[in-house]
Structures are given as structure tokens and as C-alpha cells.
Amino acid sequence: MKRIELAPGLPVTAIGQGTWHMGEQADRRADEIAALQLGVDLGLDLIDTAEMYGEGGAELVVGTALAGRRDRVVLVSKVYPHNATRRGTVAACERSLRRLGTDRLDLYLLHWRGGVPLGETVEAMEALVAAGKIRHYGVSNFDADDMAGWVAAGGRAATDQVLYNLGRRGVEWDLLPWCRDQGVSVMAYSPVEQGDLASHPELGRLAADLGVSAATLALAWTLRGGNVAAIPKAVHPDHVRQNRAALDLEIEPDVLAVLDRIFPVPTGPEPLAML
């Protein structure tokens, strides 16, 4: 299986499990828990969540799914920007830990850049590291200029989680090269564009020729650079297995060329896309 180093000394499978929109509907809770557990059993050892998702509901789902399995996964959560003050970050982390039923996070991210000075958030993150509450920290939805500002504020740039998929390639112009040069990993959220790419006609035909699903091909494409982990959300067992299959798919140059024709590379800088 393809693996990357998400942070120094923190190797993970390059396909993880996202949890955006989990914990929002009580009648889906059992399926969400089962899907996460299936993913872990299949070897997907990266789970990403956030206090924003379901206003803590997703973290509760993850906590239940990981009961007795916590040591088998790398666990990531995120703090709201309006909570990212010195005291607010620590308090938000403590709440997340309680919901997740664990004593530490492997990686804690600032969800996006808000009005709190970055240096203040960095101080809180460092305090959490010193207290053993988190192992590493990083950011989400930061463009190249934001990343430079984070580093200038003294922040460790373990990873940057951004919207990235075949139809959203703007980060390839400047952010991905910056991260590669600085040794920063990238987490691609919505790597199948919330399911839209799974039903893309041309992508589907190309994937069928390879004997895989369109979603599997889209996910495998995000991993081609070597420093990117993708975190698709899946609730149906078949979708979990399709996600897992992307770890074993090697995309040949001629197929990559076709994908570049269908989904053109950026020809200049673009504003960072967010969902």
C-alpha cells in the first residue's frame, strides 16, 4: 500500500478516511461507525475529523468507531478559527479529546485562517505539544502566502489540508511546489468532489478500461506526487473498498496524459478553492 509521512515520524496510508457530514443524522450513525471500522480493518490508518463537523457530532462517531482500536490509527482533528486563541485552542482541543475518547491527537490543524493572529495560535499549539495533548500540528485551507506567514509566525508546517482533486487543480501552480520544497505533506479533502467525479462520464469510461471505478481512479491520481494523502468520506461498504483499491493502482503515463486533457493543468495562479 502507498504510504506517506504525514508529519515527521508519522507514516500513514496515503488514503485515509474523512468524516465531513458525519454525525449529523442519527439514523446514519450505525452505518458511519461501521464504515470507519471497515476502513481500519482494511488498513486505512488515517482518520480526519474536526470540531466543526456536525458541531462535534463527527468526533463522537469517530470516538465510538475507534473504541478498542485507537492505537491502530493516526487521528487528526481541527480547531475553528474563532476558537484559535491561546486559551481557546487548548479548550477546543480538550473538548475534541473528550468527544473522541482519547488522550491525544496525532495531528491538530487550524481549520482555516481567521482573525486571530497566527503567532497566538502557534503558541497554543506548542503548549499542547508540550502537554502531550497533540503530537504534531499544522493548518488547513492555507494558500502559499498563508503558509509563508505561518512559518514566519514560528509555526511548524507539518501538513496543509486543502481542497484538491482532478477538477480543482489550482494548488498545483504554487502551493504544491512550495509544500514539496519545504517537506510539507498535503491532505486532499473532497478528492472525489463530494461524489461528483464518481459519475463523470469520461472519467468513468477511462476507469472502466482499467477495471476500476471512477472514484478509485480519481483517488489514485491524487497520490501520484508522493507527498499527498487523500481523505475521502465513505459510508457505504462498497465505497470504502473502492477507496482502499486506490492504494494499489499505478497510473501509467498515457493515462495521466488523458486525464490532463480531460482536466487541464492550471496555466497561472488561482485563488485557493474551498468548500
Image (spheres, helix red, strand yellow):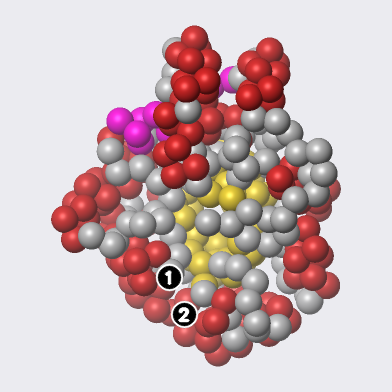
Looking at the image, tell me whether mark 1 or mark 2 is earlier in sequence order. 1
Can you tell which mark lies on residue 92?
Answer: 2
Residue 19 appears at what percent x and percent y?
Answer: 39, 54
Q: Is residue 190 above or below residue 166?
A: below
Residue 142 appears at what percent x and percent y?
Answer: 68, 62
Q: Is residue 248 visible?
A: no
Contact between labelled residues 2 and 1, with CB atoms less than 8 Å apart = yes
Numbered disc 1: secondary structure: loop
Task: Tell me where the magenta segment starts and ends, as one range.
Answer: 238-250
Q: Amino acid at mark 1?
A: Glu
Residue 56 appears at what percent x and percent y?
Answer: 35, 70
Q: Is residue 250 above or below residue 3?
A: above
Q: Nearer the viewer, residue 243 or 183?
A: 243
In the rendered structure, does residue 202 fall within the stretch colored magenta?
A: no
Residue at left 35%, top 75%? Answer: 98
Q: Nearer the viewer, residue 162 or 12?
A: 162
Q: Residues within 10 Å of mark 2 (few under 14, many from 20)?
A: some
Q: Is residue 199 above or below residue 33?
A: above
Q: Nearer the viewer, residue 259 or 252?
A: 259
Can you tell which mark lies on residue 51?
Answer: 1
